[in-house]
C-alpha cells in the first residue's frame, strides 16, 4: 500500500527513514514534513516498509510549478515488483493534482534499473556531465 505522508502524521516516514537510513536521521523527518514544499510517499505492507519516495513541489518564478524527486528507494528483496513504479506514480499524480507540469530527478548514468523505470514512465533524457536528468510532462488529469 502506498501512503502519502502528511504533516500531521509523519510516523510512517520516520519508520522508512529508520529502515533505509538509520536512527540518527529520524530527527530531521519532522522538519522535512513541516516544509510546505515537501512531498513524500511510503510503500508498506502490514509489517514491512517496502520503499519510499520523497522530494519537493517547487514554485517557479514564471508562476508554474514542478516536482523534484530527491530520493526513491525500494527494499532490495522487493525490487522489480512494481513498488518503485507505484511510488513514483503516486508522487507524479500528487504533483499534477497540485498544479505541477514537470518533474525532474537525477540518477547515475550506470544505474540501468532506475533509468529503465524512469524511461518506462515517460521520462525524457537530458544528459549533462556524469549524471543523467529526466524530465516528465505531467498530465493534470492523472488520478
Image (cartoon, rainbow, N blue to C red):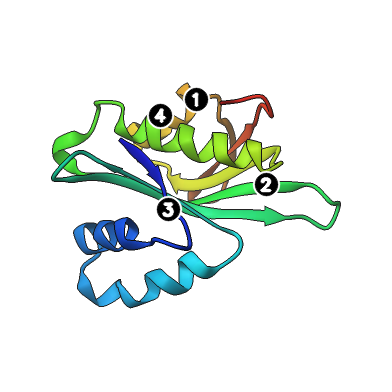
Name the residue located 23 percent from the left edge and 57 percent from the top edge: 20
Q: Which residue is mark 3?
A: 5
**Crowdedness near tag 1: few (<14), some (14–19) or many (≥20) residues, C-alpha within 10 Å:** few
Q: Is residue 88 above or below residue 143?
A: below
Q: Is residue 106 above or below residue 101?
A: below
Q: Which residue is mark 2?
A: 66
Quadrant in the picture for residue 10: bottom left
Q: Residue 98: horizontal and vertical position, in percent?
A: 66, 43
**Crowdedness near tag 3: few (<14), some (14–19) or many (≥20) residues, C-alpha within 10 Å:** some
- Whether tag 3 and tag 2 are in contact, CB under 8 A, the answer is no
- Whether tag 2 and tag 4 are in contact, CB under 8 A, the answer is no
User: Is residue 141 found left or right of 134 in the rendered image?
Assistant: right
Q: Which of the two marks, 3 or 4, is nearer to us in this view?
A: 3
Q: Which residue is mark 1?
A: 121
Q: Which residue is mark 4?
A: 117
Question: Which callout, 2 or 1, points at the residue further toward the start of the chain?
Answer: 2
Q: Residue 91: horizontal and vertical position, in percent?
A: 50, 40
Element type at mark 3: loop
Question: Which callout, 3 or 2, points at the residue further toward the start of the chain?
Answer: 3
Element type at mark 4: helix
| Near-viewer residue (109 or 133) | 133
User: Is residue 6 found left or right of 2 in the rendered image?
Assistant: right
In the picture, the quarter occupied by the C terminus is top right
Amino acid at each position: 500500500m502506498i501512503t502519502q505522508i502528511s504533516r500531521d502524521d509523519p510516523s510512517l516516514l520516520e519508520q522508512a527513514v529508520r529502515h533505509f537510513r538509520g536512527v540518527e536521521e529520524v530527527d530531521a523527518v519532522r522538519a522535512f514534513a513541516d516544509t510546505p514544499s515537501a512531498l513524500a510517499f511510503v510503500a508498506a505492507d502490514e509489517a514491512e516498509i517496502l520503499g519510499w519516495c520523497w522530494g519537493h513541489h517547487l514554485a517557479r518564478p514564471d508562476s508554474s510549478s514542478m516536482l523534484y524527486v530527491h530520493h526513491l528507494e525500494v527494499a532490495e528483496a522487493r525490487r522489480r515488483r512494481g513498488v518503485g513504479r507505484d511510488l513514483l506514480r503516486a508522487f507524479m499524480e500528487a504533483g499534477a493534482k497540485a498544479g505541477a507540469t514537470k518533474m525532474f530527478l537525477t540518477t547515475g548514468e550506470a544505474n540501468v534499473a532506475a533509468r529503465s523505470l524512469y524511461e518506462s514512465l515517460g521520462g525524457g533524457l537530458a544528459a549533462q556531465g556524469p549524471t543523467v536528468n529526466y524530465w516528465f510532462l505531467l498530465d493534470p488529469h492523472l488520478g
